């Protein structure tokens, strides 16, 4: 009888739907706000929902301005334009990141210098950074991987000797995370945010550039508005607006801003769900980590995570790939992440000199991300952890 019952249960398990890596959730008044934005007669950028979303983000980070953009990529491109890059200028970026972190600056003519990461938070390595700085460097871009602040103290100590080098945060993962009480996004001179469908707060595609120095606001507004001083005109500062500078069309549609605002209004609910999910993974997996030979992601005590993802590190690339294959075969869609940019075709083409990034190469081959989305809970969540542990045990060497 027990054997037959177990068999029926196994058959039911075989019929379970796949667990995706990510699922977008409607959390509040998204649909209501979108309808309002459409019916307002002003669904383009610069509307009421755009202003409200920008004000919320600026208030959280104490930024002088938040410019809502079509993507995090476009926010990074706007920050690159603010640098006024000249021939021979370089920008230091981490090798372990998405292409946009580097592409935005290469597009403006900067030579790239790729920096390695440190293994604790997978953020840029201050020691390697110190060895790369020279008189050609105009900016350093840091990434708060998985929503955990990189080594801000170490980076600040290094940059203290280079006061003209601007610090830029690629904060695609880190909104509502912090370092020693400082909100992520408030630490660099500029900070780029992402509201892509894979992030904590979404509108399909969207981003923002936070300006943390008042000196940058006027020019950033001109670049943001297609090179015109339209914003000054709208604020009554000039009696007409005209073409003043280079720029582009960066503005986020008010329809998308409406969707985003509804998500941001539910930030405590969303972050609460993601915090519980992170805690579950940590509690369920940590007792088996040493025995099965994997490492859990770390959140140092002086940092508050944004709970963007949960990753583990397997002993080597082959084991990671075997575990991924087994999990996917069981209907649980875990995945890997970045391939080091310094080893890519474009990375080699845009780099001004070769650099060694062994930690980025090692981490890239061993990292596995578990499914992570707002409403992952209950039996599905248990199934993820059980499937992962079974796959690691099966492929133990």
Image: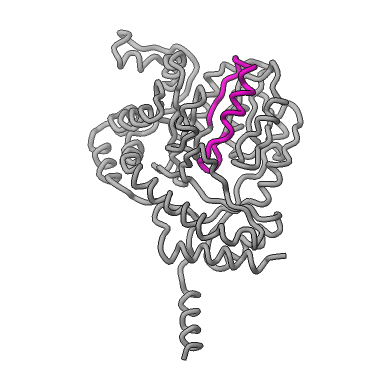
> Furthest-bottom residue in view?
1
Q: Which residues are magenta?
A: 143-169
The foreground one among 152 and 237 is 152
Give the residue displayed 72% in from the left and 38% down from the top.
357
Residue placed at 27% from the left, 41% from the top?
33
Tell me if residue 164 comes above or below residue 34 in the rendering.
above
User: In the displayed structure, does residue 130 sit left or right of residue 10?
Assistant: right
Q: Does the rendering let one see residue 320?
A: yes
Q: Nearer the viewer, residue 228 or 83?
A: 83
In this rendering, position of residue 237 left or right of residue 11: left
Residue 267 horizontal/vertical position (percent): 35, 42
Q: Position of residue 376 (x, y in %)?
A: 42, 58
Question: Does residue 323 show up magenta in the picture?
Answer: no
Give above or below for 79 relative to 305.
above
Q: Is residue 152 left or right of residue 348?
A: left
Where does the C terminus fall, quadrant-wise? bottom right
Instruction: Give residue 288's quadrant in the image.
Output: bottom right
Query: Looking at the image, what colour scheme do you see?
Result: one colour
6 relative position to 319: left or right: left
The residue under the point 32% across, 13% down is 233
Residue 316 screen position, x and y as percent: 71, 55
Is residue 159 highlighted in magenta? yes
Residue at position x 34%, y 31% in the image? 56
Return the residue nearer the eye: 357 or 51.
357
């Amino acid at each position: 009888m027990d054997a037959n019952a177990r068999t029926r249960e196994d058959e039911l398990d075989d019929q379970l739907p796949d667990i995706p890596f990510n699922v977008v959730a409607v959390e509040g008044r998204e649909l209501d706000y979108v309808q309002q934005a459409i019916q307002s007669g002003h669904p383009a950028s610069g509307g009421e929902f755009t202003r409200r979303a920008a004000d919320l983000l600026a208030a959280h980070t104490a930024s002088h301005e938040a410019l809502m953009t079509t993507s995090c990529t476009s926010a990074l491109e706007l920050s690159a334009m603010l640098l006024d890059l000249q021939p021979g200028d370089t920008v230091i970026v981490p090798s372990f990141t998405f292409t946009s972190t580097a592409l935005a600056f290469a597009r403006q003519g900067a030579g790239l210098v790729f920096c390695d990461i440190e293994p604790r938070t997978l953020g840029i390595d201050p020691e390697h950074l110190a060895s790369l700085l020279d008189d050609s460097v105009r900016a350093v871009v840091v990434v708060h991987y998985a929503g955990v602040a990189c080594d801000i103290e170490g980076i600040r100590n290094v940059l203290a000797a280079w006061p003209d080098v601007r610090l830029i945060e690629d904060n695609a993962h880190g909104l509502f995370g912090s370092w020693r009480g400082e909100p992520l996004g408030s630490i660099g001179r500029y900070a780029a945010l992402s509201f892509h469908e894979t992030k904590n707060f979404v509108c399909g595609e969207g981003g923002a550039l936070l300006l943390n120095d008042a000196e940058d606001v006027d020019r950033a507004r001109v670049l943001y508005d297609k090179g015109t001083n339209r914003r000054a005109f709208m604020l009554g500062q000039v009696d007409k607006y005209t073409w003043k500078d280079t720029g582009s069309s960066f503005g986020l549609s008010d329809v998308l801003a409406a969707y985003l605002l509804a998500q941001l209004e539910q930030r405590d609910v969303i972050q609460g769900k993601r915090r519980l999910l992170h805690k579950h993974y940590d509690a369920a997996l940590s007792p088996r980590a040493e025995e099965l030979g994997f490492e859990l992601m770390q959140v140092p005590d002086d940092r508050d995570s944004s709970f963007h993802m949960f990753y583990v590190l397997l002993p080597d690339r082959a084991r990671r790939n075997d575990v991924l294959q087994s999990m996917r075969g069981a209907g649980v869609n875990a995945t890997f992440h970045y391939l080091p940019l310094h080893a890519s075709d474009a990375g080699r083409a845009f780099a001004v000199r070769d650099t060694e990034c062994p930690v980025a190469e090692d981490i890239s081959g061993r990292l596995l991300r578990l499914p992570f989305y707002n409403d992952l809970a209950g039996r599905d969540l248990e199934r993820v952890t059980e499937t992962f542990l079974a796959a690691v045990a099966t492929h133990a060497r």
